[in-house]
Amino acid sequence: MVKNPRKRQKTGKIQHKPVPLGADLPNDASKDDEEKRLENLLFGVPYAPDKAGKEIVVVSDEEAEDGQHEVGREFENLLDSDLFFVDDNAELSALSQAPQDHVQSDAEDDEELMIPEVPESDEDEEISIIRQGIPQQPKKNKAPAWIDTDDVNVQVSLASNNRLRKLRDAPSDDTVGGREYERRLRRQFESINPTPDWASIARKKSERAKRRRSSASESESVEDVVPELLASTAGILGTTLSRPILPSTLSIERLRDANQAAPADGEIKTVAFHPSPHIPVLLTASADRRLRLFHIDGLTNPHAQTLHVPSLPITDAVFHPSGTSILMTGPRPFYYTYDLQSGASHRSPRGLWGTTFSSGRGDQGASMEISSFNPTGEILAVAGRRGQVHLVDWRSGAAQVVGELKANANVKSLWWSKAGAGELLGLTEDSQVYVWNIGQRKCVKRWQDEGGFGSRLFGGDGQGKYLTVGSNTGLVNVYNAESTIDLEGGKPKTLKTIGNLTTSISTLRFNHDSQLLAIASNDKKDQMRMVHCPSLTAFGNWPTSSTPLGHVTSVDFSRESKYLAIGNTRGRVLLYQLRHFSQQ
């Protein structure tokens, strides 16, 4: 049987009238004026604000009849507690909402997006009117992040619960409201756990600071500052006095290695912290002819930059006292400088030293490893051959030799005195110490190191208190810095000879307040000691036999002695935190 063919339905093209995007969306009564205004801006839907907050709903007769049959059924499955709620912000929103009785154009709608701010005085009045039945909390520095409005309706019985009877003010107290219950709980907690001293001091300081800012007269501000200044041990310029360290125990903690983000491929030649306490930057120079900078935060110590100098085996690198540049020297008759601000590196000009430096590898003078800046950074002293010391002017930017000093033997170490008028001291290979007056360009004093044999290097502290001389035998002589440059006195006497090490001393480093002295030797493994300078005794609790020091090549303290960096021959820079200084 042949099926009846299905009739084809004629379809014609329906002409759609272009309408704006979103115009066919129903005008939902739940949309507020702000949402409708955004639809008008984005989709071009005509927007008409509600008049005085009223809504007009148009329905057909059939929909009205269906609605009458379903009245009373839509809420039959709801709980009684879900049928009603109290909106405390209804009156506030009604007061702050202004009627809109006219339709605005698109341009006017754009201007409507800028809602004028309500003055604080008006808002405070409205809130006080609405919440006048709620007990007001005492004024605090910080407003609560959230307040539960249902606490007003809570009623708690204090007499029926044995654990709550202690909250009663009188035996007759029984039922209290939610706010009063919270206040009594807070009072009970503060009576058991009083406010700690550090919190009370911090609150008093903040209150005094607020009073100083709000006071209009200068006399009132002075009255607040003077008691605070007299009650503190801090200096007027903001510098705090360092607390003395006990000679028995050194509080120290190991952190992640300083160069873990970019380890070196060879021996660490030198480590140095930036001279500014506000710039936590550590410099490391290694045998792979690379200089690396690290940002020391005690956690990750991120790597900041690497500088490769193929033509110079870097054996010494120091920050300029101003902290703006880095000087790199090695076993070559030239040096490199790196500007931290511009990122440019410069080599020393040719012919700077004349004939006092030789380019031959076997000549002792073909090296700039022994050099030192004066405290102001204006002069660089460089030890040459045959006991000559060159003074390089660093102020002009272009290095120029402005003077020369002479010793009877090769100079092994240089140090600028901070106790006198800025004299330059030089230690020669025959254990003689020369004291030069830079202004007169001559030696004003010379004395022999006690022991008289094998003196290798020397150095002093930043306070001008001590001068230490290390020898090849591991002995360290400690002198009074003022006695070493006293022209009227004779040979200075040692305060003490430290004999904790038995191999040649390679590192001597004081911390910023001259309480700690680090001595180390790279000839033997784990040869390092920390010395308590006021008593001139070594700490017994650190380092221990399990401390992974290795062959120590360089040591440096941070500007405020918060960190201690130790470089070794394995290419690692160990980082330690001195808790005594980090807690100040």
Image (spheres, rainbow, N blue to C red):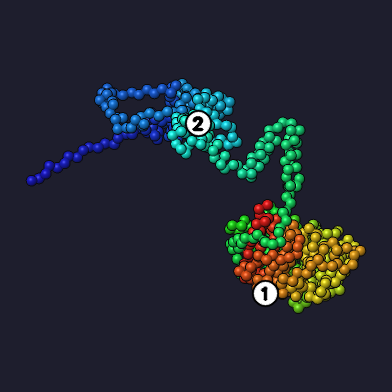
x, y (%) of residue 411? 81, 71
The extreme front residue here reads 171
The crowd level at tag 1 (other Cα within 10 Å; few <14, some 14-19, many 20+) is some
| First of labels 2, 1 by sequence position | 2
User: Could you say which quadrant of the image residue 295 lies in?
Assistant: bottom right
Position of 533 with respect to 172 (left or right) is right
Establish if 261 lies above or below 4. below
Is residue 402 visible in the rendered image? The answer is no
Report helix, strand or loop for mark 2.
loop
Task: Kindly indicate whether the residue at mark 1 contacts the one at mark 2 (C-beta within 8 angstroms).
Answer: no
Residue, disc 2: 171
x, y (%) of residue 251? 65, 59
What kind of residue is marked 1? Lys
Q: What count of labels does the image hold?
A: 2
Along the line of sight, the residue nearer the viewer: 6 or 238? 238
Report helix, strand or loop for mark 1.
loop
Establish if 453 lies above or below 229. below
The crowd level at tag 2 (other Cα within 10 Å; few <14, some 14-19, many 20+) is few
Marker disc for residue 62: none
Is residue 174 visible in the rendered image? The answer is yes
- Observer-side mark, 2 or 1, equals 2
The extreme right residue here reads 488
Q: At 74% across and 71% down in the image, what residue appears?
A: 499
Residue, disc 1: 524
Q: At 68% across and 38% down in the image, what residue appears?
A: 209
User: Could you say which quadrant of the image residue 230 lies in?
Assistant: top right
x, y (%) of residue 8? 19, 40
User: Could you say which quadrant of the image residue 85 lies in?
Assistant: top left
Q: Alpha-carbon distance for marks 2 and 1? A: 79 Å
The extreme left residue here reads 1
